[in-house]
Amino acid sequence: MKGAAEVRSGRAARRAGWFPAVLVLALAAALTFLTLPIVAIFVDSSPAQLLDALGEQGALDALWLSLRTTAASMAIILVVGTPAAYLLATRSFRGKAAVVTLVELPLVLPPAVAGIALLAAVGPSGILGGAVEAAGIELTLATAGVVVALTFVASPFYVRQAVAAFASVDRTLLDASRTLGASEARSFLRVMIPSAMPGLAAGAALALGRALGEFGATLMFAGSFQGITQTVPLAIYDRFSTEFDSALALSAVLVAVSAAILLSVKLVQGSEALGGAPS
Amino acid sequence: MRFPTLAVLAAAAAIAACGDEGGEATAGGDGHDPTLVVSAASSMTEALEACAPEFADATVRLQFAGSDELAAQIRQGVTPDVFAAANTSLPRELSDEGLMSKPIEFATNELVLAVPKDSRIDSLAGLTRDGVKIAIGAEEVPIGTYTRETLAKLPDAQEEAILDSVRSNEPDVKGIVGKLTQGAADAGFVYVTDVNAARGELEAIELPTGLGPTVTYAAGVVEGAGRPDEARAFVDQLVDGPCAEALEQAGFGPAPR
């Protein structure tokens, strides 16, 4: 009997021996595959070259434009998305699941589809094109068009996260606030938003990252023109064929910004976990 | 519950459809039916897609982009079997760098001013009207280079006025055509073959004699090609064969002699 038990535990040990090895190998492969291209961006050119390339006017224009359009689209996303997400999180109504699905759909849409869809909707020959033109608004080939494209692709990242954040706020907090006589608007601003802040911030950071990286929808809907519609990703593509160093430099900036965004999400989520969100 | 499930199914179907397409394109790489990878300038899309299935020696996998992007890929170590560009300079440069065989000129094209049908613009003079939005090729892509060279032959004031109305520098010729057919731009400089391919949605306005450049297409076998013999055969039939006929039908001119 003793012998059989030894054989069994021996087998278990052998099994335990190869499976963790597979896990480690898989992680090593994933890590190498995911980090090597990013490391290569920094290895392929010296810091001096990177700084040099960034001093060029076209690159500065692209960075400045990306900053402005991303900020504008984030403002729209936060102002409209926060109350919309609050409604979705706190009310139940017929067809709510359908509404949530529709709001999240751009999340999984390929950027090229987003570009075509925007042209078909608000492009000059789109279904609302006449109305947009009549209102004197210029979207295609204009900076406003970039903001529209960024907002379209990035907002679901925020709204989705914001709905989850509002839904996880302890309802007794809201009830207490209402019982003490605060209006719903006041409770929303003073209780719900602060309580949901870690989740809202994480959602905003994800949307920001997506907006900064937007390429396909911007190119198809807004075009590419230095200082007007050529954001950093478009400038990278533009430089790919002739000024590889400059393309690398701009890519390095986006990597740094994206890493900073991801890190801040991690920090916010870390503090959320420490704060002990109600389970 | 029903709606999310439907959406998930639809998304899954869409992903599966994309996957299928990719699978077909790469299939046959190792069997007796070899796959030949051809990198070609966007402007040849319709013509080459029509004739590629007739190429007997191999299954042809076509990839289209701006000639400069394709050349940059080759410089970065990507090796298609054939590179067919919308100019002669990029293939010549690559050949000088030892990255492809001596290029062969196989077709010509004509630069035209393109406008959506029913446009009020009917000549270069119409481009400098107030509010006209123009889309042209980016400086790096051949169509953009040809366009700038052509504009440079105009009187300085006219050249400047036209360039001031440029609102988008597109990375390839398809981008310009798309902006025109969607009404986002009022005019653009493209090849006459692009106007033919747009099936009546665009009108071509010929440039004054002597103004337009000679647009010559050249192709060669990429160094390190997996299928050099088939690649050579493909280049040859661009000059004389099914693809030469398809190019002619699409409005390309014959190779210069």
Image: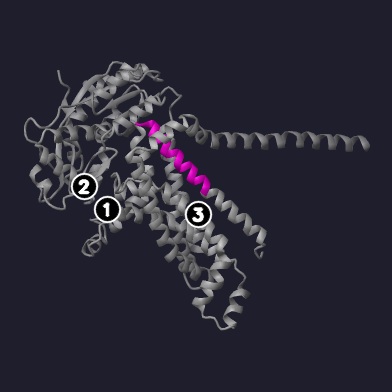
* Disc 2 residue type (three-letter): Leu
In the rendered image, residue B12 lying in the magenta stretch gets the answer: no
Image mark for residue A205: 3
Q: Earlier in the sequence, mark 3 or mark 1?
A: 1
**Bounds of the magenta segment:** A243-260
Q: Callout 2: few (<14), some (14-19), or many (20+) C-alpha neighbours within 10 Å?
A: many
- Residue that badge 1 annotates: A140
Chain that bears disc 3: A
* Disc 1 residue type (three-letter): Thr
Q: Does residue B192 appear left or right of residue A3 in this picture?
A: left
**For the residues bearing labels 3 and 1, Cβ distance under 8 angstroms:** no
Q: Callout 3: few (<14), some (14-19), or many (20+) C-alpha neighbours within 10 Å?
A: many
Mark 1: secondary structure: loop
Q: Does residue A57 appear left or right of residue A21 in this picture?
A: left
- Residue that badge 2 annotates: B180
What percent of the width, then of the height, locates residue A82?
A: 47, 66
Q: Nearer the viewer, residue B76 or A93?
A: B76
Image mark for residue B165: none
**For the residues bearing labels 2 and 3, Cβ distance under 8 angstroms:** no
Q: CA distance from mark 1 to mark 2?
A: 11 Å
Question: Residue reaching furthest right?
Answer: A2
Residue at the image point whose x is 15% and y is 21% from the top = B256
Against A145, is B241 above or below?
above
Chain that bears disc 1: A
* Disc 3 residue type (three-letter): Ala
Whether discs 3 and 1 lie on one chain: the answer is yes
Q: Nearer the viewer, residue B87 or A252?
A: A252
Query: Can the viewer see residue A114?
Result: yes
